[in-house]
Amino acid sequence: MVNFEEKFNDLIQKKIINDISKQDLIKINYDNRYEVPYEILKECYEKIDIEKVKEKIISRLEEEMADKIVNKMVTEFSNDIKQIMCNRELREDLRYYMRTKIEEINDKVMV
């Protein structure tokens, strides 16, 4: 009997975890949903301040545009760095420059 209970509990736990992961734990029957009357929707739409909506849209578009520009710039920088690092002479020059700067910082700290 204990074996059955353990298996049953395990099965229930797996089912619940599976339903949660699929977001099927609560299902709404859309055929029985409540319809909002047209008059209420119309009244709500009439009270919307279009200028506020435009401001929010502009703000979101500016943010989105800035993010896309930054992502493109990061990609370009990354490509430039890859090309520099592929060139042995440039890579060695960069290493030399970095070593000298690190040594300068180290000397200032060690004083």
Image (spheres, rainbow, N blue to C red):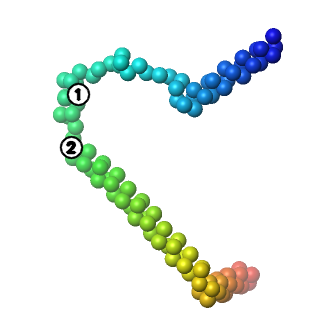
Q: Nearer the viewer, residue 61 or 8?
A: 8
Residue 94 in view here: no
- The image shows residue 55 at horizontal and vertical percentages of 27, 50
- The image shows residue 80 at horizontal and vertical percentages of 51, 77
Query: Would you name the residue on which mark 2 appears?
Result: 50
Q: Secondary structure at mark 2?
A: helix
Q: Nearer the viewer, residue 87 or 56?
A: 87
Query: Would you name the residue on which mark 1 appears?
Result: 41
Q: Nearer the viewer, mark 2 or mark 1?
A: 1
**Identity of the amino acid at label 2?**
Ile
- The image shows residue 12 at horizontal and vertical percentages of 66, 20
Q: Is residue 4 left or right of residue 34?
A: right
State the image quarter where residue 97 is shown.
bottom right
Between discs 2 and 1, the one toward the N terminus: 1
Q: Is residue 94 left or right of residue 52?
A: right
Q: Nearer the viewer, residue 104 or 80?
A: 80
- The image shows residue 89 at horizontal and vertical percentages of 61, 89
